[in-house]
Image (spheres, rainbow, N blue to C red):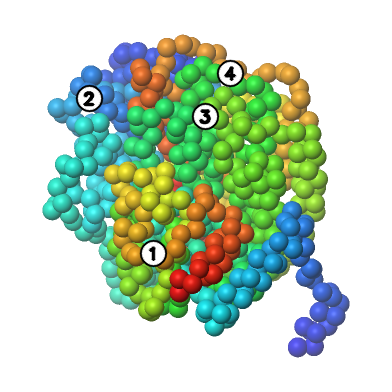
Amino acid sequence: MIEIIKNSIIKGCVTRQIKPESALLNSSELESIGKELRNMINKHFNRSFHIREVDTGSCGGCESEIIAISNPVYDIQRFGVDFVASPRHADALLVTGPVSKNMELALKRTYEAMPKPNLVITLGDCALNGGIFKDSYYTLNGVKNVIPINFHIPGCPPKPLDIMRYMIKFFKGDNL
Amino acid sequence: MAYNQIIKDIEKEMKINFLSSEPAFNDEVYVKVRREDFKNTCLLFHKKLKAPVMMLFAVDETQNKGMFKLYCVFESVQFKKWFFIVTEIPENNPEYESLSSEMYSASLFEREIKEMFGLEPNLSPDSRRLNLHDEVWPEGSYPLRKSFDIKDIKESLKKEYVFRKTEGEGVFEVPVGPVHAGIIGPGHFRFSVAGEPIINLEIRLVFTHRGVEKLFENKLPEECLKLSECVSGDSVFAHSWAFCSAVEKIKVIKVAPKTNYQRAIFLELERIYNHLTGIGGIAVDVGFSFPHAYASIMKETVLSLNDKLTGSRYLKGINIIGGISKELSGNDTALLLETLKSLKKDFESLKKMLYANFTFMDRVETTGILNKVIAQDVGITGMAARASGINRDLRKDFGACYNKIEFNLPEQTKGDVLARLNVRISEIEQSILIIQQCVLLLNSADSSFNYELLLGNKFGLGYVEGWRGPVLYWLKINEAGLIDRCKIVDASFHNWQGLSYCAPGNIVPDFPVCNKSFDLSYSGNDL
């Protein structure tokens, strides 16, 4: 214990303040969008909104942006949104990709494992109707052909701030 | 020794004459052989060039010639050439002698050709399907045949995939996936475990198979640019560059040196942000989250820089056939260099954070060893191969626009997670150097990247060393100017096997860090 205290006194604070500007971002825009999202989550989901993500054949670009909104720069967790490891813990299913035939069963099972009521959000152009992979011999042309969806976030891939904006737009629309 | 000599040597050794052997471009040679000589010719090229199979694919020419063509591709660093061994297989007798029993790197390709074209490799050691899962796709439908029609599929004939059993006292199985706990692509891992160590790992992939190669067909090359960008979302630029360079070769379009240097800059930016993700991922997979947070801020910086420079965080829509849509201005390059300078500073402290931590180093050292012999046999490429002591890099091997740029290849031999981490760290440093040199060369008028163009060829190979390894696009264009066949090989296709060979002997909790050190693409593999 003494060692740990001694160490922290000697080393001082090793973390530093993150300035979104250093990542070439406009911080006031991020903060205002975040604040609005926070209010929506407070109102509709009692302060926490848990998402389970499923990739049904996306190229990985959408996943990269979903990971980006949880990084320390955007840090969507501070606004009440979190990504969970199991569908049983989730309020919403976030689905990317045009649904490859190989993933159809896994997607259905994941959906069935969720507690109800739940939301299904599709993210990225190919999740809506197959996008660029439409009418291939091996895709099902979008998530809506497998499970019912609530709303869609367009983009290829959507930027982190756009993901937040579309979430706010949906929550504002009194669709819940 | 000229490359002709090796062809003559092989002819002599086999006591046959090849049907023909001719260069198609200054970096591609096509050797045509009879079907019965195909296997032995490929094996001899494999031995003489000391190279694994880089591509093995079929082309359906049944409609006008009544036969399939089979291409086996080897890379020769010595001659700076790609050797294509070509044979014809008649439609009414669609079989050939399997290569994979004596040349393991052909194995996955043979399985793919069998299910996509219905060409049977005789005496093949592994006859299971690869892309089309038995549970969802019936037997007897070959989607890459030209005569394939989705309406002809018979729904009834489906089977179940059988995993290989590992049996013994106390051996149990841990099935994982296809839906994983993290935000990541789908894949199924089946561990056979005795106590803590893994004794066998079987990886079943292709949950993201979308039929990409078929989607390229019967379209104009210009229409397919966006599709090539969506093959693998983290290698957008490498894929679109490889696709463009294949089209540029076929269409005899000369690309300005300035364009090439700009492409090289974007490719290195892609390499930097992906390596940063990987380095952070390796740290967090052994529970060291601070460097991960640190690296993800740096990654975000590079993505935002991409956005500022091109309007796309993932460098989409920049490559067009014959050039790029967004030229870098003087202000852009100033911003680029300035950002890289501050990135370099942060990167130094990230490095220090990792190397100075004993617990971290203890977890990554000697974990997940992939030795050189296995890596060579399986045909591991790119970053993972360089960590196992195979110093191959298309940027060095083929030069092209990299002729005037100085950079070093990492020297790692151990093949463990630490070696792969070291490779990635040193590649980031080299990438920064490459970008700095490219910026200086941008305005030079000198051209060092011209193909010796031979007209009349409707096919060609585009290749780029992406951050993961070689990205290869072989294209064939028909008389109408539409794409007839597009074969894509991402480095992930070879390297996933490396992961299954490096896992045994490690404990299950070390698997994520082994996986992250390879950092393979699901979608680039599954196509």
**Disc ID at residue A58:** none
Residue at 31% across, 28% down: B59
Depth-wise, is mark 3 or mark 2 nearer the camera? 3
Q: For the residue marked with disc 3, what is the amino acid?
A: Cys
Viewer-proximal residue among A13 and B387: A13
Q: Residues within 10 Å of mark 3 (few under 14, many from 20)?
A: many
Mark 2–mark 1 distance (CA, rounded to whole Å): 43 Å
Determine whether the residue tagged by mark 3 lies in a helix, strand or loop. Answer: helix
Q: Which residue is mark 2?
A: B62
**Disc ID at residue A149:** 1
Q: Chain of mark 2?
A: B
Residue at 69% across, 63% down: A30
Mark 2–mark 4 distance (CA, rounded to whole Å): 33 Å
Viewer-proximal residue among B104 and B499: B499
Query: Do the residues at pointers 1 and 4 share their chain?
Result: no
Q: Earlier in the sequence, mark 2 or mark 4?
A: 2
Q: In the rendered view, would you say B465 is above or below B442? A: below
Q: Earlier in the sequence, mark 4 or mark 3?
A: 3
> In the orientation shown, which residue stands out farthest toward the right?
A10
Determine whether the residue tagged by mark 1 lies in a helix, strand or loop. Answer: loop
Depth-wise, is mark 1 or mark 4 nearer the camera? 1
Q: Which residue is mark 4?
A: B254
Image position of B432 (left or right of B276): right
Specify the quadrant that holds the N terminus of chain A.
Answer: bottom right
Q: Residues within 10 Å of mark 4 (few under 14, many from 20)?
A: some
Q: For the residue marked with disc 1, what is the amino acid?
A: Ile
Q: For the residue marked with disc 4, what is the amino acid?
A: Lys
Q: Confirm or deny contact between disc 1 and disc 4 (CB under 8 A).
A: no
